[in-house]
Amino acid sequence: MEQESAAKVSGNEWSFSAFLGEFFSSPLNVVLSLICAYLIYRLLKRNSSDDNEEYEVIKIPPPLPKHDMTLEELRNYDGKGEDGRICIGVNGKVYDCSKGRKFYGPDGPYAAFAGRDATRALADFDVSAVKDEWDDNLDLTPSQKASVQEWEMQFSERYELVGRLVKELKDDSDSEKKDSEASDKVGEEQKDQ
């Protein structure tokens, strides 16, 4: 019985050596094997380097008290301030987008939106369409309005609503109440369209 198992082992060794002989006899086999080994090495190296990366810890500032903002006040929240807060105006509303710093922060792809009314830019799908002056957006087409409403919905799901974006603040509480009612009506009309 020992002789049979020894014969099997030597038979396996012969099979392995035959395999190696066959493998190295073809240059194509060697080249393909080297390519596979290189790809596996790169894959493993990439995964291990991801584990060693240091991640930047982003501190999200405490929530802003709910209040209406003018464009001038909104510009203070561009992510470059001491607390790093980012607010963006969308369709007459202001959202605190500080937790989206990766997108809207000073180095983000949508940094132009930070501290600004992004309605026109979102309607046109053009980051450079952000304006520094008041824009009532009355000339938007129905498809642009629909696009802005979709963006507004996404912002409302992801970020905290701070308040309304207004042309100027009113001191009289009665006029604020009327403005609030008017903006609610405008919001309802926009939803109906």
Image (cartoon, rainbow, N blue to C red):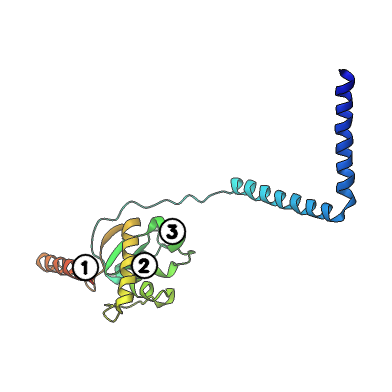
Which percent across, then down, holds residue 35? 76, 54
Vertical side of 148 occupied by 158: above or below: above
Q: Is residue 135 left or right of residue 15?
A: left
Q: Is residue 161 left or right of residue 129?
A: left
**Amino acid at circle 3:** Arg
Q: Which residue is mark 2?
A: 115
Mark 1 vs mark 3: in front? 1
- Residue situated furthest top in the rendering: 1
Which percent across, then down, holds residue 166? 24, 70
Q: Is residue 127 left or right of residue 28?
A: left
| Number of marks | 3
Q: Are marks 1 and 3 in contact (CB under 8 Å)?
A: no
- N-term-proximal mark, 2 vs 3: 3
Where residue 123 sits, quadrant-wise, is: bottom left
Q: Quadrant of the N terminus?
A: top right
Q: Are marks 2 and 1 in contact (CB under 8 Å)?
A: no
Q: Which residue is mark 3?
A: 101
- Disc 1 to disc 3, how far (Cα)? 28 Å
**Amino acid at circle 1:** Gly
- Disc 2 to disc 3, how far (Cα)? 12 Å
- Kindly state the secondary structure of the residue where label 3 is placed: helix
Disc number at residue 187? 1
**Amino acid at circle 2:** Gly
